[in-house]
Image: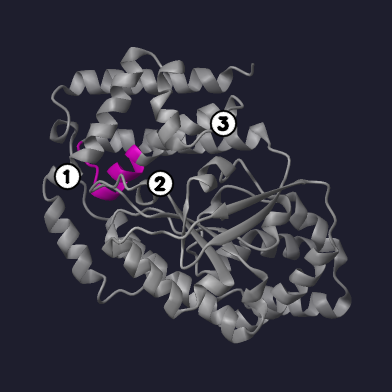
Amino acid sequence: MQKNLIKIFSKVSEFLFNGNSNNSKYYFLPIDAFLCYHFNEAELKITQTFYEKNSLNGVKEFYEFLNILKQKIGEVKTNHEVQSISINTANDKSEIIHRLTSITHKNKLHISCSILLHGSYADRTTTAASDIDDVVFIKNKVLESLESFENCKKGLMQLNHFYQKTDFTQHHGHWIFDFYQVKNYSNEIMPIAVLKNAISIGNKSEINIQLGTEKKDAVKNILQQILLEIETEKNKLLQGKINFYDLKNFISGVSLIIPLIFQYKGEEIDKKEAIKNANKIYSDEALNFIINISSLREKWNELPEYKKYKMKYKLLSYFIKNRLGLEYLAKREKGHLTIENFSADKNIFIATLNAFHNQTLLQLNNEK
């Protein structure tokens, strides 16, 4: 049973939000294992029922399980530092922000969640390549009733679908932190620096976080995983067989590596600031690669057949109401893009890419 509980804890966000949570792919919290030993026999029975019905049909069982979890969380005492962050409501009048606010209010998500946008939609630097980056903090109020719980799940799924409709190359869902995860917040997954520059959808958000001990190895593992993804996409690119979805994953991975390297070295800054200071880490050759990738973002809608694919997925979104369904199709599009589509000199691009990759590995292997 203890092993079953641990499996459940590691899937809480993923199950609750229909597989649309991205963070479960990266981490597992020690507090999960601690809680496993605080369940009585009746509570274990409910938990076992949920475990056996680990599907969308088990919503009621999962709701009961989370209510038990909420009670147990209240009994857990930690010595972690508490950080309180106040995030103002988005005052951007753009169509995207208006639509996100409308979905949030319609499903009363602002009552059960704090939905924060960060990145280009938060600082108004969007390009055609911009996807929608959010962080969702689930409040205790989500468990006030089964109806509230189901509305929260439904609302977040609608937001996710809208994200994918807005950008058919969106390759992640929500970054979700449940009420139990803020007791041992994983700063290596979503740094506090990112939250401080975010905007809140629906209403002003007050977030109280208990910071767990940051694990350098966890940051290193994330970096290594992203490097592997970049290597996979690079090989497709060199063969001229990369599609829009994979190319987006490639350039997103590159832009994520830079702030993660700073974090690995003990400096917590957001992505925008990290890219500005990339010259502290990378040579001129590697910097040239970063500049080219940034330029590709600006020229994203000029890539061959981009507008055709964008229209195709906009139409598909009216029939496919699940984000994962749209993402599945985008992933499996036949690749047709080549380096020549966005770089004047293929050999220089490859050389600068290799310089960036090698210097990133050098930083990872430098334990000082």
The kind of secondary structure the magenta stretch mainly shows is helix
- The question of residue 241 being in magenta is answered with yes
Q: Is residue 290 left or right of residue 35?
A: left
The mark nearer the N terminus, 2 or 3, is 2
Q: Which residue is mark 2?
A: 119
Q: Which residue is mark 1?
A: 336
- The question of residue 136 being in magenta is answered with no
- Tell me the kind of residue under disc 3: Gln
Circle 1/circle 3 CB separation < 8 Å: no
The answer to whether residue 325 is seen in the rendering is no
Quadrant housing the N terminus? bottom right
How far apart are labels 2 and 3 at the CA level?
17 Å
Tell me if mark 3 has few (under 14), some (14-19) or many (20+) residues whose alpha carbon lies within 10 angstroms of its own.
Answer: many
What segment carries the magenta color?
240-251
- Tell me the kind of residue under disc 1: His
Q: Residue at x 21, y 47 (%)?
A: 335
The residue nearer to you, when weighing 251 against 51, is 251
Residue 138, quarter of picture: bottom right
Tell me if mark 1 has few (under 14), some (14-19) or many (20+) residues whose alpha carbon lies within 10 angstroms of its own.
Answer: some
Q: Residue at x 19, y 32 (%)?
A: 339
Q: Residue at x 65, y 33 (%)?
A: 217
Q: Which residue is mark 3?
A: 263
* Secondary structure type for disc 3: helix
